[in-house]
Amino acid sequence: MTSRNTSPRYHGLSILLHWLLAIALVSIFVVGNYMADLPFSPTRLKLYNWHKWAGVTILALSVLRLLWRLAKRPPALPTRIQAAMPGWQTTVFHATHHLMYLLFFAVPLTGWAYSSAAGFQIVWFGVLPLPDFVPVDKALAELIKPVHAFTAFALAALVLAHVGAALKHQFIDRDRLLGRMGIGPV
């Protein structure tokens, strides 16, 4: 059963999950790019483990976020914003959100598959061993690795577009759209 949020602002849990995932995604992307070029060392191994733990955590938070979104529908865009947006912007708005949700799952799942195929089991926070997603297969690992990188960069590009659109609404259109996600008035 879903319920529509009649407030102009997102529900508090939606706002918390949004900003928590935003911080986590930016952090994991920065660390992922940094660690990829490090020489083999204890620091590189620690960062790879942290990256995997963060990826699994992001996957779990994404599941929670999707379930919450299905149960607690987001507020409708205010009429004044809908009326001001050309049709193509509305289409891009919806497409971007759908693609981001898809990539919230694709990026960590391809990372998990890559780690499994490469023969490195993920032990979440060094405590909980997770099952291998695919069998160990070095050739498969080499095929999955660029897919993980591509999906990560695609998600980063969508996040930048999302941030750019939000800032455009806030500072150019001055329609207080950021207030819906807890920043300022609505």
Image (cartoon, grey):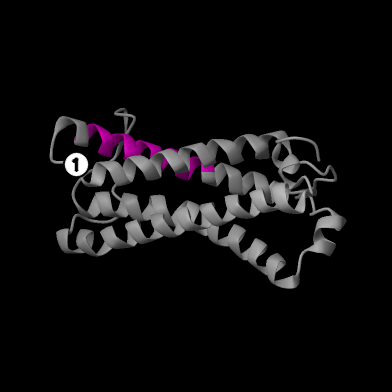
Residue 54: x %, y % from top left: 39, 37
Horizontal and vertical percent for residue 80?
86, 56
* 89 to 155, vertically: above or below: below
Residue drawn at 84 percent across, 63 percent down: 83
Q: Is residue 174 left or right of residue 115?
A: right
Determine which residue is flagged by label 1: 38
- The magenta-colored residue range is 45-61
Q: Residues within 10 Å of mark 1 (few under 14, many from 20)?
A: few
Determine whether the residue tagged by mark 1 lies in a helix, strand or loop: loop
Residue 14's spot in the image, x, y percent? 66, 40
| Image coordinates for residue 94, horizontal then vertical, percent | 66, 63
Q: Residue furthest bottom?
A: 88
Q: Residue at point 54% right, 61% down?
A: 99
Q: Residue at x 69, y 71 (%)?
A: 88
Q: Magenta region, mostly helix, strand or loop?
A: helix
> Picture quarter containing residue 28?
top left
Q: Is residue 54 magenta?
A: yes
The verdict on residue 94 being magenta is no
- Residue 23, can we see it? yes
Choose top left, top right, bottom left or bottom right for residue 65. top right
Which amino acid is tagged 1?
Leu
Q: Quadrant of the C terminus?
A: top right
Q: Nearer the viewer, residue 4 or 90?
A: 90
